Amino acid sequence: MAFPAFKCMIFFGALGLLTACNGSDGGDKPSVNTRKLTTLEGKTMGTFYSVKISGELPEGQPQLQQEIDALLEQANNEISTYRKDSTLSRFNRYQGSDPQPISGGMADIILTAQRIGRATGDAMNITVGPLVNLWGFGPQKQPATIPSQQQIDAARQKVGLNHLTLISNEKGEWIQKDLPDLYVDLSTLGEGYGADLLAQLMTQKGITNYLVSVGGAISSRGVNAQGLPWRVAIQKPTDKENAIQASVNLQGYSISTAGSYRNYFEQNGKRYSHVIDPATGRPITHQLVSATVIAKTALEADGWDTGLMVLGTEKALKLAEQQSMAVYLITKTDKGYEAVMTPQFKAFLLPEQ
């Protein structure tokens, strides 16, 4: 697919890669009256964020940038496993069984994770942290050596969604564990949560034309600087930054991609992905290399793409069809990369140029 010259911002996420483009894909004629485009960017959650706003800002740009940074900083203080004083890190260190208070936003993440975890047969499992750390992909960096089966079995004893309870009532929200060493890792949903926070902030500010991104999770509303719907390109699972696989018109929805082809280590000629299958305690070995999900919220899309990546192409496609989800899967074959999608995803797909 060829794209004419226009400005694109490439967002590298921990799990996937999407390209958000401000311009026409060649299939529509740009508006005569080009709108002002404001772009605000920064770092958060170990990745990058970007906010693109079409039209005039209702307030000064410096103040909005400060509010964005403060909002994402608060999210990091709640769910980061890299910050020792975050709410989540304190919970992970806690060895007792008393309920621990959390924010409403953090409760939303956990509730979404539990629901998707059940639907995927625990393939999307936010308690898989001990295994992620064991394989050297978490904040507790381990030497890039292959764990023994005994080490894997020991780590699996500390994993299980059934050991985590979310309590919510009119007084607040809490999380509780019945396994002292239970380790919760919300990084697989963090980018989606962050993108939703930015989208909510734009709405609160009365901004109706925007595209926001945190890593590989993107949300949009309205139109771009040319007065056309925002488009997002799904990149091919290669190291070439501008290799486009497909492009979509988000239509006000959110999108997230999980991939196994960027974060890995190699030993004795074998590649080990950062995507860990909780059922085996080992990195995935199937040939699904990318899963893209379009959903109403970035949090929802970010949770599902990880679970589908763990399941593999056949199981992921079957579940996506059962759930009536908009899903696009890329699989590595002997003949190259092959893509399959659900009928729901086709409604967002833009024609090739």
Image (cartoon, rainbow, N blue to C red):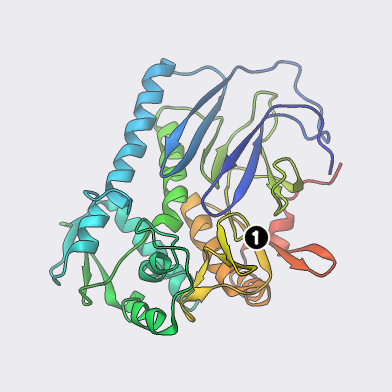
Q: Is residue 148 visible?
A: yes
User: Is residue 25 positioned above or below 185 on the image?
Assistant: above
Please identify the quarter of the rendering in which residue 55 is found: top right
Give the structural element (helix, strand or loop) at label 1: strand
Percent x, y for residue 226?
70, 24
* Residue at position x 73%, y 51% in the image: 236
Where's the C terminus, which quadrant?
A: top right
Count how many numbered circles sit on residues in the image: 1
Percent x, y for residue 178?
21, 77
Q: Is residue 203 left or right of residue 223?
A: left
**Residue tagged 1:** 290
Type of amino acid at the residue the image marks with label 1: Ser
Q: Is residue 336 left or right of residue 108?
A: right
Percent x, y for residue 345?
69, 57
User: Is residue 338 positioned above or below 163 on the image?
Assistant: above
Q: Is residue 26 left or right of residue 115?
A: right
User: Is residue 188 positioned above or below 242 on the image?
Assistant: below
* Residue at position x 46%, y 48% in the image: 191
Where's the N terminus, which quadrant?
A: top right
**Label 1 Cα neighbours within 10 Å, binned few <14 / some 14-19 / many ≥20:** many
Q: Is residue 187 left or right of residue 288?
A: left
Q: Is residue 174 visible?
A: no
Q: Nearer the viewer, residue 227 or 300?
A: 300
* Residue at position x 69%, y 70% in the image: 287
